[in-house]
Amino acid sequence: MGVEGSEGRVLSIREVGEEIVHLIVSTETTPKPGQFYMLRAWQEAPLLGRPISVFDYNEGKVEFVFKVVGKGTEILAQLKVNDEIQLQGPYGNGFPAIEGKILLVGGGLGNAPLHATAKNLKAQGQAVDLRLGFAEQIFLEEEFVQAATDTQFVVGGLVTDGLDMTKYDAVFTCGPHPMMEAVVKMARDAGIPSYVSIEKRMACGVGACLVCTCKTKSGNKKTCKDGPVFEGEEVFYEDKHQIS
Amino acid sequence: MGVEGSEGRVLSIREVGEEIVHLIVSTETTPKPGQFYMLRAWQEAPLLGRPISVFDYNEGKVEFVFKVVGKGTEILAQLKVNDEIQLQGPYGNGFPAIEGKILLVGGGLGNAPLHATAKNLKAQGQAVDLRLGFAEQIFLEEEFVQAATDTQFVVGGLVTDGLDMTKYDAVFTCGPHPMMEAVVKMARDAGIPSYVSIEKRMACGVGACLVCTCKTKSGNKKTCKDGPVFEGEEVFYEDKHQIS
Amino acid sequence: MKTSIKFLDLELKNPIIAASGTFGFGEEYAEYYDIEKLGGISYKGLTLEPRDGNEGIRVWETPAGMMNSVGLENPGVDAFASEIWPRIQDRNLISVVNVGGSTLETYLEAIRRLEGCDYDILELNISCPNVKAGGMAFGTEAKSAELITKAVRANTRKRLMVKLSPNVGNIGEIAKACESGGADAISLINTVQAMAIDTKSRHIVFNNTYAGLSGPAIRPIALRMVHQTAKATKLPIVGMGGITNADEVIQFLMAGASAVQIGTAFFTNPDQIFQIPAELERWMEREGVKALEEIIGIV
Amino acid sequence: MKTSIKFLDLELKNPIIAASGTFGFGEEYAEYYDIEKLGGISYKGLTLEPRDGNEGIRVWETPAGMMNSVGLENPGVDAFASEIWPRIQDRNLISVVNVGGSTLETYLEAIRRLEGCDYDILELNISCPNVKAGGMAFGTEAKSAELITKAVRANTRKRLMVKLSPNVGNIGEIAKACESGGADAISLINTVQAMAIDTKSRHIVFNNTYAGLSGPAIRPIALRMVHQTAKATKLPIVGMGGITNADEVIQFLMAGASAVQIGTAFFTNPDQIFQIPAELERWMEREGVKALEEIIGIV
Ligand SMILES: Cc1cc2nc3c(=O)[nH]c(=O)nc-3n(C[C@H](O)[C@H](O)[C@H](O)COP(=O)(O)OP(=O)(O)OC[C@H]3O[C@@H](n4cnc5c(N)ncnc54)[C@H](O)[C@@H]3O)c2cc1C
Ligand SMILES: Cc1cc2nc3c(=O)[nH]c(=O)nc-3n(C[C@H](O)[C@H](O)[C@H](O)COP(=O)(O)OP(=O)(O)OC[C@H]3O[C@@H](n4cnc5c(N)ncnc54)[C@H](O)[C@@H]3O)c2cc1C
Ligand SMILES: Cc1cc2nc3c(=O)[nH]c(=O)nc-3n(C[C@H](O)[C@H](O)[C@H](O)COP(=O)(O)O)c2cc1C
Ligand SMILES: Cc1cc2nc3c(=O)[nH]c(=O)nc-3n(C[C@H](O)[C@H](O)[C@H](O)COP(=O)(O)O)c2cc1C
Ligand code: FES
Ligand code: FES
């Protein structure tokens, strides 16, 4: 079963923090940074696949980092090397190509897609700084350091504290929505564009079912297809402080 | 989770024939031959446990032999050593204690409970003959030979062919219902009592839900609790040729 | 912290009641578990005459559910009153006697013959989809639900709880009709009418064509109906349908139920059900809930 | 062996139709799959005016099912007719246009504005539980179902298929009412009204209180209702509710459906759905079934 490319095999799986798992899977697909897959490693229950962002990609190997929060991620965490796993995707748009020096601000598992993005920008010769917030413990420190021009970690505190955005041409962010809202505000004040990666519950992942709608300034968008990356100003505008 | 005794661990699991699995599980319970457990090695799906007979029991270790026929047995077949498995039971009555020389006639997976029964009778010093039918291939041949005074295998043909029941004091049978019906008839003709072990779809396994009702001469019985062993004459009587 | 709950003038030590038809008369599970950990038992549905139940396959698994077609196999009210009740009456459990029937007369006569047993709650089953004697016809029209409730009310001094069928368009309307008829409480839902076909044999699985679906599959439907019933009537409600753990019990309480029944989950994981009262207590402690009454109907 | 099937005067190359609301206008899945492997598509439900749909959480998983509260987000009939239809009209697929409304007038006006599009079947949605505009009120009473069917019949030359709600007591009665009203076909079931409560926040999950349950959990209910509808009317039926594979398609055909729709299963395993036509063909070969018509309604 499976159209070409949707079946993968676990190449490596290990815990890299408390309930945080680094998973490497074989694939015939080629994802862009900021995209995600719907992951599935079970038959019937749970019903839906789980959207997980690309942490890294190297010739035929896609990497994910995810936190165990419920049934789906629990099953994923118990996979063993060589187990089959279904990857529907890659889906979504990813961060845009912008010239100049880019700041990436992440929080928690939102750091995952920023890794792929930073690495890609750096490979293209752009200057890219990572500012990553972790609640208690940094995971995959070495990988994050390698991925960017300059990487700084904030453990426990607010990753936005003391950030000077005027040095950058754009800021990309992924993490808890209040954090992203703060980043968008700071970017606005600094006069640079901001891009946010949004999380919504999903079903189809391709844009057909409309359960992941994100209200934006210019109307409803599909998080899975038009996003997950949106212009910050589109999502966190004026009186729109809360996205559900 | 689990009341005392319901959790077991896989001690050994191996294929002993095509899609036929021999499973050994640790247990704190002590089953009698002819009893069964409701086995479960999954969280949500499928909903119900699966009734499987005791093939053997030795201090803290209960053995099962089962055929992979659907979802439940498929999951059971994929267990690995040390995996957890839930054993609700032992449930049911088992074959009765009868003095004298006993004939055991089995077919297919119905041979499984006869192994435990034969072994037990032999250990008590009774003469016990096994006549076992297999569709294509004998499984666990050595075990069956050891279990009885005399063991004969029939592959492909009818296990009832040429059976002389007049030599015995009782016959116990387990297998496809038409086979058991034939055995009951032969026992009737030979004037000896017969006991049959019945298979019915079950839910609770303890006698509370009444989904496993078996119509008998003396009214409805619960296969899980009053059975699975019934007097042959009670189940396969006169015009009652078909039990669903 | 106490998990006890007031239901009518009764005190249940916890809101967990075994659902009718899934727990027999409690004697089988009592061989393996301390059944007095529960708040109560609703006994197997009784009819005036003993019944053998349906022929053919009686159980079929479905995704996250099961269908049953037991067809109210039961020993009849006389055997219950004379043989069974004396054996089981001394339990420290709220006792619910569930009664079905095919005509108004058989209902009334059955109930009269049970009047001598000192049980706590009469559960009037007008919702069994598996037999005429289940009275589902009474339970799918508001008028006939009111009529039978009224008639039963006039014939019993017991607390009267009417068990509703989910196979209706407007559950609130039926509940209101039972309220008008004089019911003291409502329990719901009974099984959802459903069907299975075996493509190999090209036959309907159940001799009776349709059967009753229970288990987690129907839980979101049951929760909705409990909520709608709570909005429609002031009667206390016993909610059920697919409950398997303490969090789900709390969902039903929040939707408006004062207590719950649990059925199918005894088949999948009995151990887990007997632990729910303790789980509830831990949850109350964690959440600072002093009495479960605080959360009933709060959504 | 051919998996094609006659439906009204149409020939579907196979009986698999994507269910309304789960497949958009087919363009998204077309990026990944050869959608012309299907027999047809029922497009996302349209309303007269564009709709933004419901606020808040729109999807919630349940055991073997999911609840949705999309609330008929759609671009409106004018945008469909002028922009979308021209893009998609040339597919080798039966096209079903699904229309919702809040009042009889909005239904009729929406349908009139679609009249210029050369689509195959109008699917009249009187069964969406998530919004007033879904018209579930029309779909739960026989009288109003007949009324709206009649009015729509008088206003369109399209083949008219009415999509029924499962949230009723007597599905056959509603189907018969649609037949009297002049429907050419019936499709069912829409989602089952259901509810979710988040005990942590102590809130109802959906802003709209209730939402629609779909997926394998409801399949046994859907199968029963298709069977009841087939017994009640002579109209051809498109059955749906929780179908995930060829064997289940065959169950619905045996229960009396001429074709099926599949929705939720596209989310869980799209690959598998696109393989159903080939699976059906293998089954026919194995079973010696020359035309699927042989098995429709045989149980
Ligand atoms: C585009 C996208 C990319 C993501 N990338 C990552 C990642 O790289 N690493 C990571 O750890 N997490 C990521 N998430 C969140 C991840 O999808 C959820 O943590 C996961 O779905 C939880 O599943 P569960 O079964 O363990 O939890 P449960 O709570 O049991 O899930 C129940 C349902 O809710 C959905 N759900 C629960 N939490 C979320 C959430 N935060 N976002 C979306 N749906 C949710 C599930 O998909 C499922 O349908 C991403 C989410 C999105 C939308
Ligand atoms: C008392 C008893 C003892 C048994 N002992 C053995 C044994 O030792 N070895 C062995 O291989 N099989 C035995 N069986 C049969 C075994 O229970 C079924 O093969 C098994 O339940 C099939 O489950 P499944 O999920 O693989 O199949 P599925 O067909 O997917 O099961 C669907 C449902 O039907 C039930 N079911 C299917 N077939 C049977 C059946 N023959 N009997 C009862 N329920 C059934 C399942 O339990 C389940 O609820 C026994 C049955 C009973 C009643
Ligand atoms: C095997 C079985 C037998 C049942 N018998 C009865 C009955 O006799 N009377 C009754 O009112 N309900 C009966 N029910 C319905 C249950 O009491 C309950 O309403 C339903 O199963 C939903 O709860 P659950 O999902 O927790 O099982 C029966 C259910 C099952 C599964
Ligand atoms: C996300 C979603 C959106 C839906 N939108 C519509 C709709 O717009 N119009 C409609 O008639 N049915 C709609 N439905 C109902 C489906 O068409 C179908 O009737 C139902 O989901 C049962 O089929 P399934 O279990 O295969 O999904 C929707 C269902 C889902 C899951
Ligand atoms: S998840 Fe279906 S449209 Fe986004
Ligand atoms: S399986 Fe419940 S009574 Fe036998």
Image (tube, coloured by chain):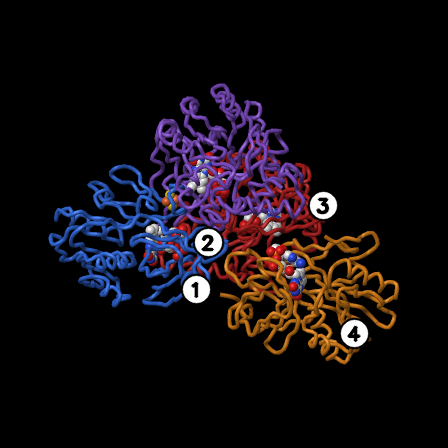
Chain colours: A orange, B blue, C purple, D red
Q: Which residue is mark 1?
A: B79
Q: For disc 1, does the CB lie below 8 Å from ligand 2?
A: no
* Residue A129 as seen in the image, left or right of residue B67: right
The answer to which of B99 and A228 lies nearer the viewer is B99
* Amino acid marked by disc 2: Pro
Between C85 and D142, the residue placed more toward the observer is C85
Chain at tag 2: B
**Secondary element type, mark 4:** strand
Residue at mark 4? A129
The local secondary structure at tag 3 comes to loop
Where residue D28 sits: x, y (%)? 63, 60
Q: Quadrant of residue C116?
A: top left
Q: Nearer the viewer, mark 3 or mark 4?
A: 4
Measured as percent of width and height from the top left, residue D142 is found at: 55, 33
How far is disc 4 from disc 1 in space, using C-alphas?
48 Å
Residue B116, picture quadrant: bottom left
Q: CA distance from mark 3 to mark 1?
A: 56 Å
The residue at which mark 2 appears reads as B46
Please, what is the three-letter code of the amino acid marked with disc 1? Leu
Compared to residue C289, the image places residue B179 above or below, namely below
Label 1, label 2: how far apart the Cα atoms are? 15 Å
Q: Are marks 1 and 2 in contact (CB under 8 Å)?
A: no
Q: Which residue is mark 3?
A: D49
Q: Report ligand 1 position as a quadrant.
A: bottom right
User: Can you tell me whether the CB of the residue at mark 2 lies under 8 Å from the nearest atom of ligand 2?
Assistant: yes
**Mark 2 → mark 3, Cα distance in angstroms:** 44 Å
Q: Is residue D188 visible?
A: no
Rounded to the nearest angstrom, the CA distance separating label 3 from label 4 is 47 Å
